[in-house]
Image (cartoon, rainbow, N blue to C red):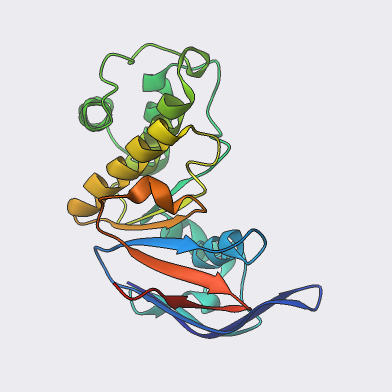
Amino acid sequence: MIEFNNVNFAYKEEPVFSGLDMTVDAGSFVLVTGESGVGKTTLIKLITAELKPDSGKILVDGKDITKLKDRDLPAYRRNMGVVFQDFRLLEESTVYENLDIVRQVIGLSRKESERKITSILTLLGMQDKFNNIPLELSGGERQRLCIGRALMNNPRLLIADEPTGNLDPANSREIMKIFSIIRSQGITVLVATHNVDATEGLIYKEFVLSDHTGHYIEE
């Protein structure tokens, strides 16, 4: 699904990655961990093609995304869902409206969108929150809504950047359980996090970033 081959990247000549190699298998649940500042968010931005490496290859589904033109980026990103730590919700819109807005981008009919939204909210345990606005939701519910929005386009890849960073331990565990359920549906899930404790009892692989490179922890 994802391959980093000898990837080098620096911010203002300060190296972040030097010869980074990483493989994420299709349908896997991978945690990207490491101390603050080691490049977890940078790695995600390289996968979403917000950044390009200084050298090396990044393959997604066999395609070298470092060669994508700007005009190709919307189509590339349509196959992925992204969950942000800071939510980025429409605060004055309902839960339904926050999800339905994706319909305009991906071309769903209103009926298809409603069916999809009902299914997603059921998966997230939020079927009774249809008409609530984000200010009426708990932090955990707001993050679930963000996950729901990321699922609206039927992504093959779901990426999350510190999705439990603002949550208490109980809500953090619930969010990680949801990612595990999503993975069981055949979606590849990649989560950058410092909160490995929240995944206790779940099946996942851990890729640790350190010293400008990274490695998988043996299971």
Q: Quadrant of residue 53?
A: bottom right
Q: Tell which of 48 and 192 is nearer to you.
A: 192
Q: Residue at x 63, y 78 (%)?
A: 211
* Figure quadrant of the N terminus: bottom left
Residue 104 visible somewhere in the drawing: no
* Figure quadrant of the C terminus: bottom left
In this view, 152 is above or below 185: above
In percent of width and height, residue 33 lies at 50, 62
Q: Residue at x 26, y 55 (%)?
A: 187
Residue 24 visible somewhere in the drawing: yes
**Left of 50 or right of it: where is 114?**
left
Q: Tell which of 172 and 138 is nearer to you.
A: 172
In percent of width and height, residue 157 lies at 34, 58
In this view, 186 is above or below 129: below
Q: Residue at x 34, y 49 (%)?
A: 199
In this view, 143 is above or below 94: below
Numbered marks: total = 0
Q: Quadrant of residue 20?
A: bottom right
Q: Residue at x 41, y 25 (%)?
A: 141
In percent of width and height, residue 132 lies at 41, 12
